[in-house]
Image (cartoon, rainbow, N blue to C red):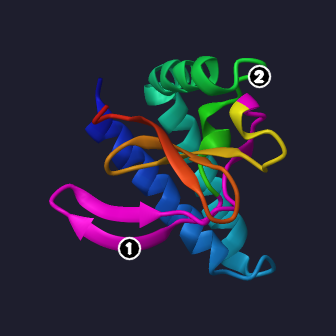
Amino acid sequence: MKTREIDKGLIEIIEIKNQLNGIVYHDQKYDEIEDHLHEIEDNFLEKHGFELERILKKVHVAICPDVDLLSPLSYIAHEYKKVGENETGPIYDIKHDQGVYVEVDSYQKKPTKLVIVPNPLRVILNIDGHTREEVWSVNM
């Protein structure tokens, strides 16, 4: 698995998304940056979509088998916060409200969401406003 390449691609998408989050929607640059983001996302899916779908499918089968699998891009958070750096690049964290809603039997009545986080590549289940669980990692 080419996880380092996936990490690089995710980080590029994250940085562009974070840049968009810092711009007012009516700014002239917004459309230009958003178009660039869509181009980068399309290239990312072309290169890594199959591999990420395979990972996400494993997660879905394990924790939420009745939930439809979406495009890997759906599992990328809207906003990431840079919390450090290591030898392979920036380290990011996400808020507990980020991710795709999924119904997890073991967490009924809780707003569970899946989200992809890079460096190291992992899938996080945000269980509620305070709890999260790493449900897949390149290190597992």
Q: Which of 24 and 32 is in front in this view?
A: 24
Q: Residue at x 70, y 18 (%)?
A: 65
Q: What stretch is highlighted in magenta?
A: 78-105
Which structural element holds mark 2?
Answer: loop
* Dot 1 and dot 2 residues touching (CB under 8 Å): no
Residue hosting label 2: 68
Q: Nearer the viewer, residue 58 or 105?
A: 105
88 within the magenta span? yes
* Residue 119 left/right relative to 94: left
The kind of secondary structure element at disc 1 is strand
- Up/down of 16 relative to 84, above or below: above
Give the labeled residue for mark 1: 83
Amino acid, disc 1 = Val
- Local crowd at mark 1 within 10 Å, few (<14), some, or many (≥20)? few
Looking at the picture, how far across and down is residue 45, in whole percent?
54, 31
In reply to whether residue 93 is colored magenta, the answer given is: yes
Farthest-out residue, left: 87
State which quarter of the image contains the C terminus.
top left
Is the residue marked by circle 2 packed among few (<14), some (14-19), or many (20+) residues within 10 Å?
few
Three-letter amino acid code of the residue under disc 2: Asp
Residue displayed at 77% across by 24% down: 67
